Amino acid sequence: MNLAELNIHYSYVMIVILLVIGLWGMLGKRNLVKKVIGLNIFQTAIFLFFIKGALKDGATVPVIDPQTGIEAAAYFNPLPHVMILTAIVVSVAITGVAMALLLNIYRSYDSLEEDIIIQRMGK
Amino acid sequence: MTHNIPILIPISLIFFAFFTGVLGVMRLRYSQLVAVFASALAFSLAVWGTVHVLTSGALSYSFGSWPPPIGIEFVMDPLSAFMLLVITGTGFILLLFPTKPGFKIEEKRGVPLYAIVLLLMGGLCGIALAGDLFNLYVFLEITSLSTYALVSIGSGRAVMSSFRYLIMASIGGTFYLLGVGFIYFATGTLNMADVINLLPAVYSSPAVIGGAVFIVTGICLKMALFPLHTWLPDAHSYAPPVVAAFLAAVQIEVSAYIIIRMLLNVFTPEFMVGLLPLTDIIGWAAAGGVIIGSVMAIAQTDFKRMLAYSTVGQIAYVGLGIGLANPLGITGALLHIMAHALMKSCLFLIAGGVAQQTGITDINGYRGLGRRMPWTMAAFTVSALAMIGIPPTAGFFSKWYLLLGSLDGGNWVFLAVILASTLLNGVYFFRLIEKVFAPADPADASARNPGELPRSMLVPVLVFAGLILAVGAASVLIVDNLLSPAVQGL
């Protein structure tokens, strides 16, 4: 990838970096709250990917304006935004359930560090 | 009226979920009755829809009267109808099982338990009906969210295994969403019937290839296909028995259905078999899973944990059928979905009932139970024989189609894997059957003297055992009417 390509695609590079940070947080971190944060970063990266895909150069808000006409190229694509609105709701629900589970785990084991929990499970 | 059936099935479940939730906080007993009613309603609608699909073709429902591909649609074709029958039928019988042994919850406690179960069933039905890639994601996450809550009800380490399951399944779901994004930006549509028309023009585009890989990887994680199965044994063995039955019998099977749907109706076989070796990869991973799952099951001493590992092996049979990607192989995979739903539910209910009645969870404790619980253990024997694949049970016919499929595809390794795993299944189930019908340890019998299971627990168990035999007897009918039209595209 040369510099000119990077200039066009830099936002995708950023999205991939966010994806990898999120995956590392989920699989590599030993603290359970950090895993949930990783999950959120991972999902946000995908939301950004959809939003980036909806962008067009020189387009405007997707509300039909008599001056702009009904040319589809003149408006941003609204569908990815709507999908991501739904996906954000799903992600909030997942975070909520994860937090409820963490609360239960903390009450049972008095810790949120995976190593300590495994140690206490063994007893 | 008939064209509304596709929407009425999930709506009836999700609508009643609200009432059972409110009722559950006051009286758990009454909310179970409402849940049984709701699932019976969904099952009868599914039967009615199936009859309609068989006589006059597929049903389609467009939301808000927006015609597809612009609007969202629900499609009920033979494949969906088959899955709906499995989901609602199994769910209905599982809900009949009493609350205390089934969920390990005292009936007096006020919890919206059955609302979550109905949401789970509604989500699964939505997946089976969705004609739209993004809609499928939403239902997939509804299903997953309700299972996290249900698994965490279980004992001991259940909460921790539920959290691990949440992390793994969320990665799977998010991968699926990423893949859907790739497909959407390459084709500009989310409707499955539209994607299959537009896709051939952009087959070689890296976005489509990447999208297909992300979708299949994500769903394989949810399906617990070897080597992505690591979350399954913990989540399934610490969950309460009825929840474990729901997870093993319908939830992961529906993920397998998604892959079959992608193969047949989204990516076309020539793309997933010819251009990308995706089905080959699934098949070889499944071949590993069949062997590993069975070997690990032999090594377990806890009955529920043994069943959980055997699920890893059994779901891999479905993966083998997908890997073969010929009509006989897919027919075998679908028939195995139905057979596994019945036999695993039966076994998990027996595990729950026996644990409630006698406190026995270890397989060594099953020694001599055949004399004390003849009916339960007869049902156990039927489902164990089905797990091994002995005629005339349902498990034999699904394996038979898988064998025919591997002969047809000339795949001798898969043939050997199926035969070898049948022997391994035989090792761990014949060992149990022998224990069950051996004379009891006299020292042990005096300590506990449990009789037959109470009728409320025995009825669902016996119904499942009867269905295993009935599906075996009716397998030709099912294959001719529902599955042959479904796999026509291959």
Image: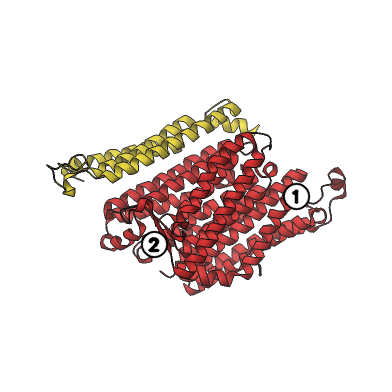
Chain colours: A yellow, B red
Disc 1 sits on a residue from what chain?
B
Residue type at mark 2: give it: Asn
CA separation in Å, label 2 and label 1: 47 Å
Residue reaching furthest to the front: B1
Q: Quadrant of the C terminus of chain B?
A: bottom left
B386 or A88, nearer to the observer: A88
Q: Secondary structure at mark 1?
A: helix
**Of labels 2 and 1, the one closer to you:** 2
Residue type at mark 1: give it: Asn
A11 or B471, nearer to the observer: B471
User: Residue sitting at 68 percent across and 54 percent down?
Assistant: B460
**Percent coordinates x, y for residue B72 in the rendering:** 36, 52
N-terminal label among 2 and 1: 2
Residue B364, disc: 1
- Report which quarter residue B429 is drawn in: bottom right
Residue designated by label 2: B265
| Label 2–label 1 contact, CB within 8 A | no
Q: Secondary structure at mark 2?
A: helix
Residue B112, disc: none
- At label 2, counting other C-alpha atoms closer than 10 Å, the crowd grade (few under 14, some 14-19, many 20 or more) is some
| Drawn side of residue A23 relative to residue B341, left or right | left
Disc 2 sits on a residue from what chain?
B
Residue reaching furthest to the left: A67
**Percent coordinates x, y for residue B295 in the rendering:** 61, 55
The correct choice, above or below, for A111 with respect to B487 in the image is above
User: Total number of numbered labels?
Assistant: 2
| Drawn side of residue B359 relative to residue B338, left or right | right
**Percent coordinates x, y for residue B44 in the rendering:** 56, 58
- At label 1, counting other C-alpha atoms closer than 10 Å, the crowd grade (few under 14, some 14-19, many 20 or more) is some
